[in-house]
Image: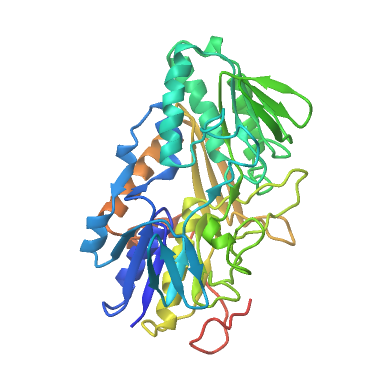
Amino acid sequence: MAHIVIVGAGLGGLPTAYELRHILPKEHHVTVISETPYFTFIPSLPWVAMGLTSLESIQVSLQKRLQLKGINWILGRIDHLNPQDQKISFGEQSITYDYLIIATGAELALDAVAGLGPDGYTQSVCNPHHALMAHKAWQNFLLAPGPLVVGALPKTSCLGPAYEFTLLADYVLRKQGLREQVSITFVTPEPYAGHLGIGGMANSAHLVKEIMAQRGVEVIENVEVTAIEPNQIHLGNGRVLPFAYSMLLPPFRGPRFVRQVPGLSNQDGFIPVLPTYRHPEYASIYAIGVVVEIKPPEETPIPLGVPKTGQMTEAMGMAVAHNIAIELGVISAQPVTSTLDAICFADFGDTGILFLANPVLPDAVTGKRRRAVALSGAWVSWAKTAFEKYFLAKMRFGAAVPWFERLGLKLLGLSLVKPIKVEISRDISQEIS
């Protein structure tokens, strides 16, 4: 009998829990620990900030659903991890595990620049609480519009929400007849807009710059925010931008309990993994999603994080569930790894861009992907809405990746996982590339 503990109930943790419970016999126990009683569809938080949807509409209550599925549920924040004793502590409680899957997402480094974040002078859409605060500030902004500054700081691992927020703001302001009263400036550490932390994708740079120009958005590239004061943002190139409202994505780092364990993570708290997403040194620990260390495909003048999209995160979780089942002797198969294929919808209100990458990271030798597509149109906005509804339905009914979803991906020439080579042994900790 094994006890598998998953820390985090987001885009990675919750589907992984469902998949493990589906694969493993009942004598194996699955426990989910989360700081929040709800699953939140994080990609829709820019809509919440803009008042285009409610937070409640993109959330799923977890406790009863998980218990009905035979999954143990604990509401709590991890304070300490002891990998030697295979024990985690939260508050005055602690539990032991046979396997630990870290799926926490990122901690926001709001201390990177003084004045950053809702407790300072800018807003964020990186978690539900921040999105609600951003919405309240946005409502006040609409009563007294002025300069709007949107962007990201170095080491932000997902730049998509900054682009979405910028163009959703333009969309909302135009609908309300306020656009002429608001200048919009987009500030990015990317060497060029549309780089996205992955060296660009197909014609992403052209599409992004074209729509920004059409909407009258000033784009400032390859620059970092150095200081934030009330109504002023200082840039590394010497410019000072006035603002009445600003949404800046902060740098990402791994959670504190991970950073406190010697050898578990890199200096920023991201966890190195083997192809199976097992830690190289701590054989009982796996990691999935944003907390995983993925090296950027190229060095940039200002450091960027590599995006781990929802599809990439879910694929990592499916790989981990499969590989743990192999080690427990439940299934007989080759271990697998994530393909890192991804479809990403960037919604801008009345239009959007679909990014399809196969895989997200270009080949280290050729610098190319097997396939990369960037398409724009109003249909992207509709598609993202449909996907949100579908994903929330999966989380409500307790499904990870149904057969018809796998079939749909296959028809698109995509897959979530692929086999990896290992030594002929059931102990898949002896992995080879």
Q: In this rendering, does residue 251 appear at all?
A: yes
User: Observer-nearest residue: 133 or 208?
Assistant: 133
Left or right: 306, with 396 as reference point = right
Quarter of image, res 362? bottom right
Q: Position of residue 363 (x, y in %)?
A: 68, 60
Q: Residue furthest bottom?
A: 424
Quarter of image, res 154? top right
Q: In this rendering, does residue 417 appear at all?
A: no
Query: Residue placed at 42% from the left, 56% from the top?
Result: 77
Q: Position of residue 270 (x, y in %)?
A: 60, 59
| Quadrant in which the C terminus is drawn | bottom right
User: Observer-nearest residue: 365 or 395?
Assistant: 395
Quarter of image, res 403? bottom left
Relative vertical location of residue 86 with respect to residue 10 in this rendering, above or below: below
Query: Residue placed at 65% from the left, 46% from the top?
Result: 155
Q: Residue furthest front?
A: 92
| Quadrant in which the N terminus is drawn | bottom left
Q: Position of residue 125 (x, y in %)?
A: 48, 37
User: Observer-nearest residue: 212 or 310?
Assistant: 310
Left or right: 75, with 210 as reference point = left
